[in-house]
Image: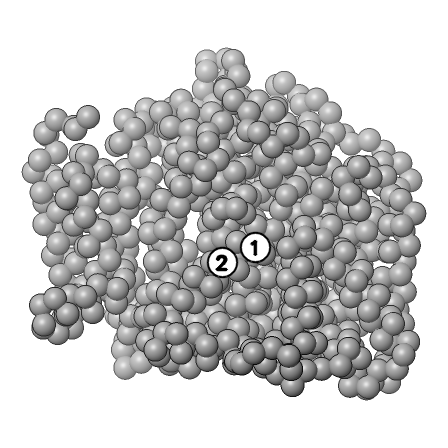
Amino acid sequence: MADERTGAHSAPPSGSGRQPSSDGTAAATPGAPASSPGSPLPGSSLYGAADKNDPFRPLEPPPGYVPGSSGRPAPVDSALPDVRLTSQGAISDEALRKAEAYIEQEEGAANRLSGRAGMIVTAIAVVSTLFHLYAAYAIVPTQTLRYVHVAFVMALCFLLFPLATRFRNAIRWWDVVAAIASVGILGYALIGGEEFTDRATMPDHLDVVLGVVFIVLLLEATRRTTGWIMPVVAILFIVYALVGPHLPAPWTHRGYTFTRLVGHLFITLEGIFGVAVDVSSSLIIMFTIYGAFLQHSGAGKFFINFSLAVMGGKPNSAGRTVVLSSFLLGGPSGSGVATTVTIGAVAYPMMARAGFEKNAAGGLLAAGGLGAILSPPVLGAAAFLIAEFLKISYLDVIWMALIPTCLYYLSLLFMVELDARRFGAKAVPYDTSLTIPQMLRRYGFHFTSLVAVVGFMVAGYSPMLSVFWSTLLVLGLSFLRPDTALWPKKLVRALADGTIGVLNAATTCASAGIIVGVVTLTGLGLKFSSIVLAYAGNSLLLTALYTALIVWIVGLAVPVTASYIICAVIAAPALIKLGVPEFAAHMFIFYYAVLSEVSPPTALSPFAAAAITGGDPYRTTLQAWKYTLPAFLVPFVFILDPLGVGLLMAVPKGGTVLDVVLIALKTAIGLGALAVAAQGWAWRAVAAGERGLWIVAGLLLVFPSLLEPATEWLVGVDVPHPAWFGLALVALLVLHQIRTRGEARPA
């Protein structure tokens, strides 16, 4: 899945698996910058051989080297290696190269530049970041900000991402021409001012020619960063706009001339430079800058070490560490694949020693990485678009995501606890040279900026200003420790990575603007919702199921951000027509767009995790599904349960705050029951018939609308409150498990 982080995807340094100390314990060396989402880290795979004593110590890059995504190694053979722990218990370099290749699949294979070319590209990226920081503080006209943002993005895309893999690691003349042409065309649009925008419905010949060239350049930049699928989808929507009169009902529309279509997409703020680019040029890039500053100040390493210290020393500490560290690392970055790889490089040796089976370990790592897209304060790039589509504050989106995020990680913790029982997990010793209080005294300031982002928004600052001041706070606090201080060399890398990190999301947003522009121009959204409602017979349950299926299928082909944008404009209207609150419909679509992160054939997170663990990629994907599917029933609660909006921190109509608490507790218990069913274990192994009862109990609590009609049809009696049956069934099953836990475990 291509986007979904809002910072650059980071690849862990080769050899960055946790090295044991002399006594065989997992060493945790605080302070040095760790590989973490936010932007790629300097490490051995980028800059040279890893330091044997401290795998997280950053090594110096060659002069003029472009930091960030440009440093990842080229993809290697697609067959997964037979990964074994090295004699020191670290992940092999080959495994990390495999995992890094999956990150490249997500955001493109970038050039590795040095010398003058590297310095020029770094300078462009730094200037871009400084411009966006200025735009966050000062007032820059909307149209100017969008044009300049896209100009920087496209220029860097052509300079950093080659036309083909065989042209890597050098800037070719055609890359320079494409970059200059992109900037020149947007300069023409900027100079034209209002006179240019007034020609949107009747553009002149030069406008059309430049518009066509720009659209082609944009699709090529998107292809370089995300692959072929997104540009092809955008082209299909363009074709739909042109051939509308020749299509059968209900897909037909009056059709638009080529000139009119180009004017709408290129000149107006309803096409390429619409809502998606507005969000990319303001919120998304500000969070990538923030993530880059956090990463270069060593926050990622601290979060992992802190998770180890808090969760260590128990049989289930390995799994708990993955869950906690994925939340801490993913929260400020929003990256799924990068969080999976970063944590996997450190945590898998510990999971293996604890007794985790390879595929189960990979599934948990992928599920933890997926939580990065769901976790405040950043979530994924699509979350910023939710705020813009709904015309609400981003703080409201964070607020809505709070309970679902807690339920997601609670579901993972249920799974981890059951894993510990099922695998007979062993306690893994780890380095205790620093106690938790000592660690917090030295490096606890990294938590400050995470709280500050939300704190500034609560205080009334705009999201842009909140992230702006939080970024400056990261910069200032970094000087509390000499090993975290952002001195000029590290500061330049952080500034460059801030813009480099947004390239993938920005090109996706700009190309998605083509899709949104066609949908608004042709009225496809209303047509599509009418078709869905007709097939569903105006049934809310069937409409929800169809919508989830549509979002999931779209998500298999395009990144999460694009999947959300497409489905928000074509699928959400159907749910809204049936009385679902608009915010609930959009959150439902967002969560199912995220599910594509662990769904073949684009299941990059599980595939990357399999590269780390040496497991089978498809079995790892199934394990990831097992971990995540209970939590992905939660979105149905948003729209099918009368009290479901309580999970989005909204008081149900005619209800009270108590209803919010009750729906959260009911759903949490239901997820626990489904976790037992998925794992086949509670206090002891669960028999087949008993597992079926756990499934029924969980669905009665989480997804009663699925069982209620069937139950009423079978017994012929209205069942108004199926949740109470679910609670009673859970209580009976728990009692039975406790009473029989001493029985021999089935083979």
Picture quadrant where residue 670 is located: bottom left
- Say which residue appears at 89% left-offset and 36% top-offset: 115
List x then y, in percent, for residue 16.
59, 27
In the rendered view, would you say 610 is above or below 83?
Answer: below
Which residue is labeled 2 in the image?
A: 553
Q: Nearer the viewer, residue 632 or 119?
A: 632
Q: Nearer the viewer, residue 531 or 189?
A: 531
The residue located at (9%, 42%) in the rendering is 736
Residue 334 horizontal/vertical position (percent)? 55, 52
- Number of other residues with Cα within 10 Å of mark 2, as a class: few under 14, some 14 to 19, many 20 or more: some
Per the image, the residue denoted by label 1 is 557
Dot 2: element: helix
Q: Position of residue 382 (x, y in %)?
A: 56, 62
> Which of the numbered marks, if any, corresponds to residue 428?
none
- Whether residue 329 is visible, yes or no, is no
From where the camera sits, is residue 504 visible?
Answer: yes
> Left or right of 580: which side holds 472?
right
Report the number of discs: 2
Question: Does 739 sit left or right of 569 as displayed?
Answer: left
Q: Residue at x 12, y 74 (%)?
A: 718
Kind of element beneath mark 1:
helix
- Quadrant of image for the C terminus: top left
Amino acid type, callout 2: Ile
Query: Is the residue under label 2 in contact with that under label 1 (CB below 8 Å)?
Result: yes
